[in-house]
Amino acid sequence: MAVNSSDYPQEANELVAFLFNRRETLLNNWRSACEADPSLKSIAVMGRAEFNNLIPIILDILEEQLLGTKPETEPAVAAKSHGLQRWQMSLGLPELLKELHHLSVILFEELQLFRQLFPSAEPDMILKAQQQILLLMNEVIRGSVTKHDELQRLQAANRASKLESALQEMEDLSRQRGHLLRSSSHDLRSGLGLSLGAASFLQMDDLSNEERQQYVDMLNRNLTHVQSMLTDLMDLARLEAGQEALRLEEFDAASLMNDLVASAQPLAVARGHILRADGPPSLWVKSDRLKVYRIVQNLIVNALNYMPANTGKPGLVSVSWVAENEWRWGFSVQDSGPGLPAGLMELFHKQLKPFVEPVSTLSADEAQPLSVEPNQEHKVTSETLRKEVAHSKGEGVGLQIVKRLCELLGASLEVESVAGRGTLFRARMPIETPS
Amino acid sequence: MHRSRKKQQNNILIIDDNPDQWTLIRAVIEKTFPQINAVWVATSQATIEYLDECTANYQALPKLILLDLYLPLRDNGFQLLQELKSNASIYKYPPVVVLSSSSNSTDIQEAYVLGCSSYLVKPATLLQWQELFNVVKTYWWDTVTVPSNR
């Protein structure tokens, strides 16, 4: 430091002794000044040690500087630590500057008091001591503010990146939505085109009976396909518009599962697959019977269609149900298909809802970096559904319906998939669905 | 070789994943365009395999390729188109005409960006199909000059 008081060693010693003697008073005065400041409300909740923090060390540094010795601790280092601690105590930047300003004022007052008590003191020494206090306090302020600012920028960057990823997810969702719509409208148009084509080709004059039958089959096949696509789309639209009401009733879920599996057996046989049902003989629940039915039906049809048909090696679809405890039950549909594409599983762990930090900039929690709470529910996201479309036309809509129905029933939907071995859909819900 | 080349030059390759669509296209080609030889493939992979086979057997490539976009996803069709038209591709010629049910403007734009020669929206009735293939014949067979094939 360019300026020091070592030119007057005797008087510097006296000043240091004075300041040391006054240290407790000085710190108390500083606290009082801060507490009297209406803009420093958060000071009041700090304990004495918390409040004083590293200021005694700063005062040690001041002593050493007044004596002309090299300080043991760099003032900037101590100041940065102070800035960090104040950050952790949720003190904002304006408050930090204020409290340091109060400290400077108190130090100058002490210097003034020293002059009053010791009028014989060398004015040059006082002047130089004043300069040293000023320089030190500048350094303390710079150090504290640098750290504080660094942390604030870090947090801002953190928040910005969180918002950015939330925005990204929103964009992904809307893109996937557009994709589903475009894909559906293409499938519809194509199905209708083929129906019209088959109908008009039927009017050709020189058709053989075989050709005629071929076009009639084509017409029926495509009209049925269009009809089922339309039904699915309308179901989904109704679900998304929130027009589906819950109709709660008590029913035996086990017999519902058995009935469903029995009615899907013809499809399983036609595609060369084995369809099994396993679970307790009776499982009474209070839920929306029709909606549970549609979920299971969609999943079974999905599983049966998902596995390659009639390859000589039959695929296996297992439907099972269980009461987990007194208040939850669940069912699962597992296939032995090719499994979901690689890299897809991680998508199940993604939350559908974007996470936006709920606290404001200056709230008490601010100092603690907030982490995104991992969600235990592995929800089926639209991204997954979009990929599902790749396997079979129209399938994306079916799984969307399952997802919406589960939401409506308060059920969680989990998916596990192993490439080459199969995919498992599991829905779990309350035994007594609250109305 | 001369004979076979002449025959091959009347080849048209239909890429469509829907067998019903192929049934209709085959019937309308037989009716309106009997001298043409239509070949059907359902996937991107089968397309490349067919073209590789032509090359391996010293056969001419098809004179024209009709490409459906949604195979079953539009990305599948676009990827194939991109592959065929890429700089490294040995199948940059023949011309690819997209034949899709989609009249979506993004699809149309993307197809031209990736290098299709024309974009046709699939018709529905027999009459419309006949008109379409008449136009294809008049234009690609009787009007335009294409690079000599091998």
Image (cartoon, coloured by chain):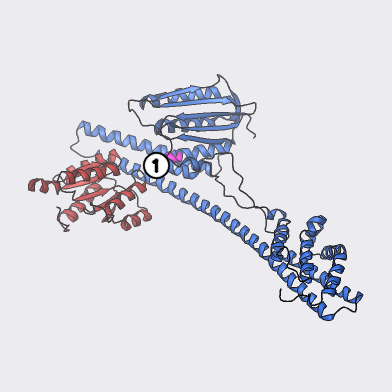
Residue A170 horizontal side relative to residue A48, left or right = left
**Which color has been applied to chain A in this rendered view?**
blue
Q: Position of residue A292 (x, y in %)?
A: 54, 31
Query: Considering the image in quadrants, where does the C terminus of chain A appear?
Result: top right
Q: Is residue A400 above or below residue A60?
A: above
Query: Considering the image in quadrants, where does the N terminus of chain A appear?
Result: bottom right
Quadrant position of residue A194: top left
> What secondary structure prevails in the magenta region?
helix
Decide whether residue B21 is among the magenta residues.
no
Instruction: Check the residue under mark 1 and report the chain it is in.
Output: A
Residue A164 horizontal side relative to residue A21, left or right = left
Label 1 environment density (alpha carbons within 10 Å; few <14, some 14–19, many ≥20): some
Q: Magenta region: which residues?
A: A393-397
Give the residue displayed 76% in from the left and 70% down from the top. Answer: A65
**Which color has been applied to chain B in this rendered view?**
red
Q: Position of residue A263 (x, y in %)?
A: 44, 24
Q: Is residue B85 above or below residue A63?
A: above
In the current view of this chain or complex, which residue is farthest to the right? A117
Find disc 1 in the rendering and name its residue: A390
Q: Amino acid at mark 1?
A: Ala
Residue B85 horizontal side relative to residue A225, left or right = left
**Residue A304 visible to an observer of this rendering:** yes
